[in-house]
Amino acid sequence: MESGKKYGGRTFVTEVVMIIVGLVFLVPFYFLLVNSVKSFGDLLSNAANWPAAFEWSNYQRAWEITKFPQAFSNSFIITAASILLIALLSAMAAYRMVRHNSRFNKALFMIFVAAMVIPFQSIMIPLVKVTGMIHLTDSIGGLIICYLGFGAPLSIFLFHGFVKSVPVEIEEAAVVDGCSPYAVFWRVVFPLLKPMFVTVVILNSLWIWNDYLLPSLVLQSAEHRTIPLATYAFFGQYTKQWDLALPALVLGIAPIVAFFLAMQKYIIEGITAGSVKG
């Protein structure tokens, strides 16, 4: 009986601590939402207070200045195409490396793992030179190719561990039934990779949608700007239009936050399952 009381007490304390931690993490969202509907003067006088008057026109002005529909379209196309290529190609590559465990595939996998620890800042200048030489600069397609290169190592690493948990006997039974190697992967193995596939999609979506640095290096034209690049227009050398930048940030993060909340249950499931035999 005493152990049950102790366990119940510990559970209550743990829940209280988690609620407090959750509220701490929500504080930035409070400042973002509250200050996005303030006037510039009200925002500077006290950022923590509730708005004296709700300036909903901030959203309309931010929408017009950033040309939000165009920026949203660019971000959506880049994100969707990049994560689709990363997830599909990484799944196929990881499956091949696991099932054909040759020295070459082992070395190739180690190269992908090693690429994960290379700081992006160390290859920024070579990246700009290479993209310029092969005419990928100022191109949405070129940016998608860059994201494929940078996103593949981690995705292959995650798929590699998950594929090991798929029983080989299932594939052997499919071969006996007359499936070709491609049919074995797409009809048998790939459906079993759904938890990890969704995990890879979510993780890369959060990164690509919110990324500023890589698009700023590759894209140059105003019509190709993504949401982070369009939002940066409010920050000049001498002025910072926070009353417009914050509404633009809310408009930019709302789609990806909604997507994350809808799909978050797959993250822990996929990573945990992939680490069983990884």
Image (cartoon, rainbow, N blue to C red):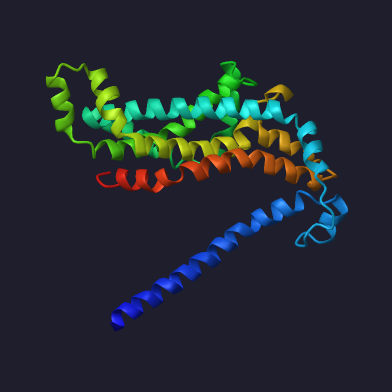
Find residue 176 and report its image quarter.
top left
Front position in the image: 11 or 234: 11
Q: Is residue 164 left or right of residue 44?
A: left
Q: Residue at x 60, y 27 (%)?
A: 128
Most distant residue in the front direction? 1
Front position in the image: 160 or 112: 160
Q: Residue at x 88, y 54 (%)?
A: 41
Up-down relation of residue 239 to residue 83 (above or below): below
Q: Is residue 179 visible?
A: yes
Place of residue 113 in the rendered image (x, y in percent of width and height, measured from the top left): 37, 38
Up-down relation of residue 17 to residue 199 (above or below): below
Q: Is residue 157 visible?
A: no
Place of residue 208 in the rendered image (x, y in percent of width and height, measured from the top left): 55, 35
Up-down relation of residue 181 to residue 171 (above or below): above
Most distant residue in the bottom direction? 2
Q: Residue at x 82, y 55 (%)?
A: 43
Q: Quadrant of the N terminus?
A: bottom left
Place of residue 21 in the rendered image (x, y in percent of width and height, measured from the top left): 53, 64
Q: Residue at x 68, y 44 (%)?
A: 250
Up-down relation of residue 185 to residue 12 (above or below): above
Q: Is residue 194 left or right of residue 167?
A: right
Most distant residue in the left direction? 176
Place of residue 64 in the rendered image (x, y in percent of width and height, measured from the top left): 79, 31
Find residue 160 and report its image quarter.
top left
Q: How many marks?
A: 0
Find residue 10 and report its image quarter.
bottom left
Q: Is residue 20 left or right of residue 59?
A: left
